[in-house]
Image (cartoon, rainbow, N blue to C red):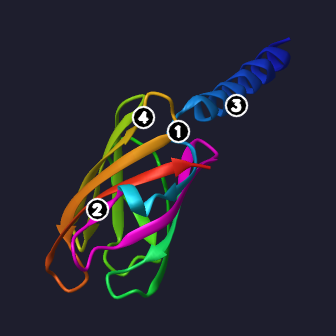
Amino acid sequence: MKRKTMLLALAMCVAGATTSFAADPQMGTWKLNEAKSKFSAGATKNSTVVYEAAGDKVKVVVDGVDGTGQKIHSEWTGKFDGKDYAVTGDATGDMRAYKKLNDRTMTFNQKKAGKIILSGRIVVSADGKSRTVTTKGTNAQGKPASATAVYDKQ
């Protein structure tokens, strides 16, 4: 009897975690809408960003171009708890932290060798069809860079 109860409880936890990720408006594939976005010279442009469940964590895959036009690809797996988790494939940073403020708003920081090099805010629209990411930081050359990037949900 105890075994059945434990298995049922485990199944409900897994189903609950999957449901909570599915209901999260941040999750899914987002494509950059360049016409609605503004970038400073030398800023990185993330053309596609994918948020997907990875067990009890979230995996974020980013593809785009850096300030010199070179293709970039990075991956991060962690929780939206404000703690640093490793990012791979990003020459400008080695750690990233996302913090959920509410259902539609998150903040994030990217660090290189313990120093914050980029910070931003992500806000999903009320209808869930777009999101706006505002960032400030330094580019790969160490110069100030900022952006307001608008993404459409795919």
Magenta segment: 37-59
In the image, residue 44 lies in the stretch drawn in magenta: yes
Going by the numbered disc 2, the residue's amino acid type is: Lys
Please tell me how crowded label 3 is: few (under 14), some (14-19), or many (20+) other residues with Cα within 10 Å.
some
Going by the numbered disc 3, the residue's amino acid type is: Val
| Residue 115 visible in the shown view | no
First in residue order: circle 3 vs circle 4: 3
First in residue order: circle 2 vs circle 1: 2
Q: Are marks 4 and 1 in contact (CB under 8 Å)?
A: yes
* Position of residue 80 measured from the top left corner of the image (x, y, whole percent): 41, 42
Please tell me how crowded label 2 is: few (under 14), some (14-19), or many (20+) other residues with Cα within 10 Å.
some
Going by the numbered disc 4, the residue's amino acid type is: Ser
Image point 25% across, 58% down: which residue? Answer: 135
In the image, residue 40 lies in the stretch drawn in magenta: yes
Q: Foreground mark, 1 or 3? A: 1
Residue of label 4: 125
Residue of label 2: 38
Query: Magenta part mainly helix, strand or loop?
Result: strand
First in residue order: circle 4 vs circle 2: 2
Q: Foreground mark, 3 or 2? A: 2
Please tell me whether residue 7 is drawn above or below residue 27 in the rendered image.
above
| Distance from the alpha carbon under mark 3 to that under mark 2 | 40 Å
Tag 2 secondary structure: strand
Residue 129 circle label: 1
Please tell me how crowded label 4 is: few (under 14), some (14-19), or many (20+) other residues with Cα within 10 Å.
some
Residue of label 3: 14
Image point 39% across, 52% down: which residue? Answer: 150
Q: On the picture, is 92 further left or further right than 117? A: right
